[in-house]
Image: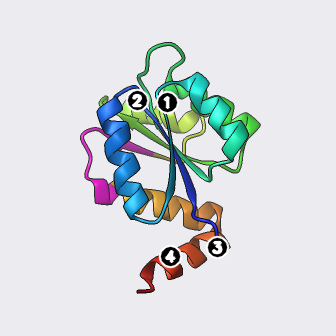
Amino acid sequence: MALPTLLVVDDEAELLSLLKEYFGRQGFRVLTAADAAAARALVAAEGPQVAVIDVHMPGEDGLSLARWLRVEHPGIGIVMLSAAAETIDRIVGLEVGADDYVAKPFELRELLARVKGLLRRTQPAEAAAAEKAAASP
């Protein structure tokens, strides 16, 4: 059984490292990208089930990347991350195609729960098998 693949896109190297380690320990195959261009290449090559994307990045921002993902790869679940917790920022993120929005700073377990919930909705059979495998000793 293949592990669910998560793509994390953020320009903060420390956060990428933390999320890669954390989600890896939770039974995910984790891909990381520091910008939208690298994320696009990984999506084409690896086909992740879920993308966690920072809104504010240099160059192409996360909103543009999310819009592209929703058009070109509609099956990918999208969670937006942002330090901007204003209501309008959340609305815009959801309007461009994100499935969920998490404000920084966040609890790792909350982000994990949101990613798992998104997987259950977008990949129900795969998510159930992955959770069953993760629960087995």
Q: Secondary structure at mark 2?
A: helix
Q: CA distance from mark 3 to mark 2?
A: 37 Å
The mark nearer the N terminus, 2 or 4, is: 2
Labels 1, 3: front one: 3
Quick one: label 3, few (<14), some, or many (20+) residues within 10 Å?
Answer: few
Mark 2 crowdedness (10 Å alpha carbons): few <14, some 14-19, many ≥20: some
Would you say the residues marked 3 and 2 are in contact, meaning their CB atoms lie under 8 Å apart? no
Which structural element holds mark 4?
Answer: helix
Tell me how far mark 1 sits from mark 3, CA to CA.
36 Å
Give the labeled residue for mark 1: 92
Name the residue carrying label 2.
89
* Amino acid at pointer 4: Glu
Tag 3–tag 4 contact (CB < 8 Å):
no
Is disc 4 surrounded by few (<14), some (14 to 19) or many (20+) residues within 10 Å?
some
Please name which of the two marks, 2 or 4, marks the residue nearer to the observer.
Answer: 4
First along the sequence among labels 1 and 3: 3
* Residue found at the very far right of the displayed protein: 72
- To which residue does mark 3 refer? 1
User: Residue visible at 46% across and 66% down?
Assistant: 27
Question: Whole-Å distance between the Cαs marked 3 and 4?
Answer: 11 Å
Q: Are marks 2 and 1 in contact (CB under 8 Å)?
A: yes
Q: Secondary structure at mark 1?
A: helix
Q: Residue furthest bottom?
A: 137
Q: Amino acid at mark 1?
A: Val
Displayed quadrant of residue 86: top left
* SS assignment at label 3: loop
Residue 25 lies, with reference to residue 111, above or below; the image says below
Question: In this rendering, would 87 be left or right of 51?
Answer: left
Q: N-terminal of the two: label 3 or label 4?
A: 3
